[in-house]
Each structure stands twice: as structure tokens, then as C-alpha cells.
Image (cartoon, coloured by chain):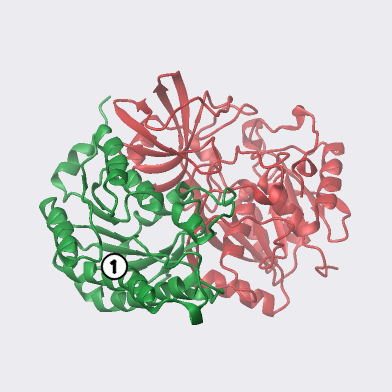
Amino acid sequence: MPVFDYSKREEHRLSNVALVTGGGRGLGRVLATFLSGQGYDIVITSRTEDELQDVAAPISAMGGKVNAVPGNINDPNHRTRLLEETNLMGGVTLLVNNASDLGESPRPELVHASLDRLRLTLETNLVSPLALIQKALPQLQQTHGLVINITSDAGQAGYERWGIYGSSKAALDLVSKTLAAELKPLGISVVTVDPGDMRTRMHQEAFPGENISDRPLPEVTLPFWAWLFNQDRPTLSGMRYQAQGTLWEIPVQ
Amino acid sequence: MRREELSFERPTDLFASQPPEVRGQSRDDVRLMVTWPEGDNSHHEFTDLPTLLKPGDLLVVNESATLPASLPATSRLGSICLNLSTRFSDDLWIAEPRWSPSRPGPLPLDEGDILQIGDSTVKLLKSYPGIPRLWLTHFSAPTSTLMSMYGEPIHYSYAPVYPLEAYQTLFSRFPGSAEMPSAARPITPRVHNMLLAHGIGITGVILHTGVSSLEIEDETVEHQVLYPEPFHVSAATANAVNVTHARGGRVVAVGTTVVRALESAWTGNMMRACAGDTSLYIHAGTGVHAVDGLLTGLHDPVTSHLAMLSALIGIDRVKEAYQEAIRSRYLWHEFGDSHLIWKKRVENN
């Protein structure tokens, strides 16, 4: 008995295009691969071309469409190039600002922190994500897209020696919530996601020399992403989620 | 708590293999054991339930209806069974591949493997993090169509499969559960009417329950990973719970799914309207706050359900009650007998 095959129906829909920054390893890598498995076309970027190719090769081998574009997210020309790529693919529907700068390692106390290094952290974690959203606005408006800004509990807690990274994420949280309100009339949704502690290179750099093998691999967040990508986006806009939390809440109207 | 503390032995002839109505009885023709806060147990018929409650008490039922979520599939291992557990969208589910309804996995399957259902395909995207028996699965055809064409209710070795109606309750309104939220099964229209006549309130939540077949595998009970389930607590139900508490009435969850939904919506001193997905794990370490009692069935050893019961009265009293149920030949599982557990420190007359 034939079953209606709606993979064919997909051809008549707008394609789904995801742009994932920091896509060369860790969470970005897992997310890009997972999205591709569900039929998203992918643009990934990071500064390290080798790592990007390691992510892109298996995606291509599985028949996925992926475009690996190495470069620095703080370079305006690179940001322009990324969005030209997503535009050629049909327009970005999912923008994941995942690339982050931890700052100095080991992490300094604020009174001893390098101010130049602080400016670089803010550039990477706050200014560039906003710049990418500004630049992507026409595409996001056309696709009624979703922006996901990756945040951290360090942005809320006030942990000692986390002030640099934490303040950049606190600012990103507020930028996201403000954008959610401002972009609602345009049909664009914005959420922030705290992925929680994970066994990644960034986490290792945050705890140099320490054993972090008790932290879960970034795959632990996949059920959350599976959930998030299938919710009604405008309903969730402005929310902040913990991917490893016990409650992923939908605002009750 | 250590894993073996949730372990107990029970004869297999206490597994209910038939719904009472198949034996020509009524659905409410089951027994009801009550475990009181002090730990003593008493024995009743299920139809005594209204007299065991007081006017002003509130029953909260699960309004989720059961899906025909068990699908026959073929894989490179041959014919297998794929039990859908938790829906993210019509083509993306958490699912449990099994050798057959009665024979569990885990199966030696790999990421990227393709299963066949009819002439459509299912891709195994990723093993579920922390629960190797489950997979994140992507379907080429809508699962709603596949279920209507090929699905049957999930069933296990202790009972044959019955028509889908056997897995619905009086309150089943919103399809979405992989398995029957079975605690309300014996509430027939006549029991329902008696409850209302006694001044007992009845209200609903929705929690779409996933597969229940998973034993706790972690040696430390509290470390076990639980998967998320979609739920909804309406403003009306939240208000009913708050008013019941304020007036000194007791809130009785009908089923462990209702406890999970209500505790997920609990703010620390009151209930609020809440929806989303919850993977809240309720055990002795977390306690329960929103409910005063639980009407449920009899649960398998080494399951998260038992950990939840221990949150109400402590694991020792749970095990004493289960020994009493075994001695008195109560029947286990979804077609079996009922168990009303009052939370410790609750006043009753």
C-alpha cells in the first residue's frame, strides 16, 4: 500500500537554511550535523578551515548540502560573505550565533583583566552577533526566521573570575530579549539558549589542566534542539532556555 | 538511593493480562488498596473510591489519549518493532526499536541506519543521550499516517494486544500518549457520577506519556536520565488546585503522569498555568509538593515510577505496601488493580 511521501512535498516548500557560527567543533558541530540530518541546508563558519572541513565532509557524504566558509566573525566582509551564501541557498531561516570568545585563560579577576581583551570578547560575543542579525534582517524577514543566541549561566550568576565572559553573555541576553520585542512585527523570532556545561574545547579552556570528563558531550543537547525547532516560533520569541534543564516552557496565552 | 533498593520479587501470575471487561466484568471491577500516611494499608473495591475521599477533595486526571504507537518495521537485522515514544513533530520522534513487542532491545543498530515501514523510511539520527535503548528518529512519511495504516497499541509480553479502545479512559480527549495513562481506567461513568455526587472535584491536565518499558540503569537512582514529555496545565486547573489547597481539601493525582505535570507547574507555593516539555524526575530527594495523594496502579521493580512513590511515603513504606499487595494477590500493570497512596503528614479522619 503506498504511503503519501512528503519528502516530495518538501520540494515545493521554501528550503530550510541554517547559518551556524563556531561550526567547526563542539556544540556548533553537533548542531550543524543534526540540522543537516533533518534536511536543512547548512552554512558553517569558524576561523579554522581544517575543522570546518571535518564537519562538512560527513554531512556531504550523507547527501546533505553544506557550505563551509572559514573566516573571522568579527570581520564585516566575512559576515557579508556568509549572508551572500545563505541568500544563494534561498535565505537564512535559522541563524545560530554560537561562536564565542572565553577571554583570557586562565580567567582573571575583573580588577586585573586586560581591557583590550575585554573589548575583543565583547566584539565576538555581543557586537558581531548583533551585526550578523542586522545584516541578515532582509532574509530573516522574508523567511520569518528564528535567531538563536547561545548564552551561559555565567551571564546571570556573578561567579568569581567569570566577569568578562559573563558580562558579554548578560548583554547578549538583554539584546536578544529586546530584539524579540522589536522584531516581532517583522515576524522574526529570537531566543537565547544556555547549553549548560559540556565536554568541549571551550569548556576545557575555561578549566585549564582540570579533568572535565564528567561533563556530558554536546550531544546531550540534541533532544532540546529537536524540541525547539518544532515549536511555533513567534510563541517562544523572547524566551531563554536551558538545553539541559528539566522544563522547556511554552508561554501559556 | 541505590538501584537495588527499588527491586522486589513478585510472582508472574499477578500480571493482569486481560482488561476486566474482556472477562465480562465492568472496568471498575478491580480492587483498590489504600496506603495511609502512617504506612498501614486497607483493602477496598474500586467503587469505594468516592467514600474514601471527602467533599472538597480534587481529583486531577490526564486527558491525553493513547496512540497506536507500535509500528512493524524492517531493518538490516530483519523484522523488528518500532515503538514511538515522544513526538517533536509528525516526522521527528524519540522511538524505541525492539526485536518484537515482547522482546526488548537494545538492538545493535547504528547512527544513520534506515528502517523501512511500508514503502516509507525511518532514519536513526542519534542514539538518545544517556538512554541507549532510545533513538532520535526521522520519518519520510507522516507518523500520523503510518500509525493509522500500520500501528497498534504498544503492548508487552504479559498481555496480548487489544483494540485501541481498551487503552483509552473516560477522560482521553487529546491523542498523544505512546502508552495508556492507565490510572483513570477504572473510573467508569457510574464511578464518575458517584464522585461528583460526593462533592469531589475532577479536573484535567494533559501529559503525553512516552514508553514506560525502561528500567533505571544507573546504579544511583537519582542519576538516571529521563526523556522529556509534552504537558499542559491550564489556568483553570491551576486555579482549582490552589483553591482546593486554600480550603483544606486534598489534591489527588490520578496517575504518575499527572504528578509529573503538576509538579512541573509548581512554583514553590502555588500552581500556575504551564505548558511545554518536562523531564522532571521526582524521587525521594525531590519530594512532591503540589499533590497530597496519588491514585495509581502497581508498578514494576526498578522503575522511575517507584522512585516517585518513594517521594510520597518513603521507599520502605512503598515496599511494605507492595509486599501486602503481593500477599493479597493484587494484579499488576495497566489492566490490573489500583493503589491510592496518601502523602506522609497528611491529616485524614
The colour with which the image depicts chain A is: green
Q: Is residue B73 above or below residue A228?
A: above
Which image quarter is the N terminus of chain A in? top left
Residue B271, image x, y percentages: 59, 72
Residue B255, image x, y percentages: 64, 53
Query: Which sits in the foreground, B91 or B232?
Result: B91
Residue at x-position 73% and y-position 39%: B301
The colour with which the image depicts chain B is: red
Query: How many callouts does the rendering have?
Result: 1
Describe residue B2's horizontal placement relative to residue A160 as left or right.
right
Q: Residues within 10 Å of mark 1 (few under 14, many from 20)?
A: many
Which image quarter is the C terminus of chain A in? bottom left
Residue at x-position 85% and y-position 50%: B316
Q: Which image quadrant is residue A65 in?
A: top left
Describe residue A144's horizontal placement relative to residue A29 as left or right.
left
Single out the residue that lies furthest toward the bottom. Answer: A111
Name the residue type under label 1. Ser
Q: Is residue B270 visible?
A: yes
Q: Which residue is mark 1?
A: A189
Residue A84, image x, y percentages: 12, 57
Query: Which sits in the foreground, B324 or B132?
Result: B132
Residue at x-position 42% and y-position 68%: A103
Please, which chain is the residue tagged with disc 1 on?
A: A
Q: Is residue B90 visible?
A: no
SS label for mark 1: strand
Q: Is residue A128 above or below residue B336?
A: below
Residue A122, image x, y percentages: 35, 74
Describe residue B119's horizontal placement relative to residue B336 as left or right.
left
Q: Is residue A220 above or below residue A187?
A: above
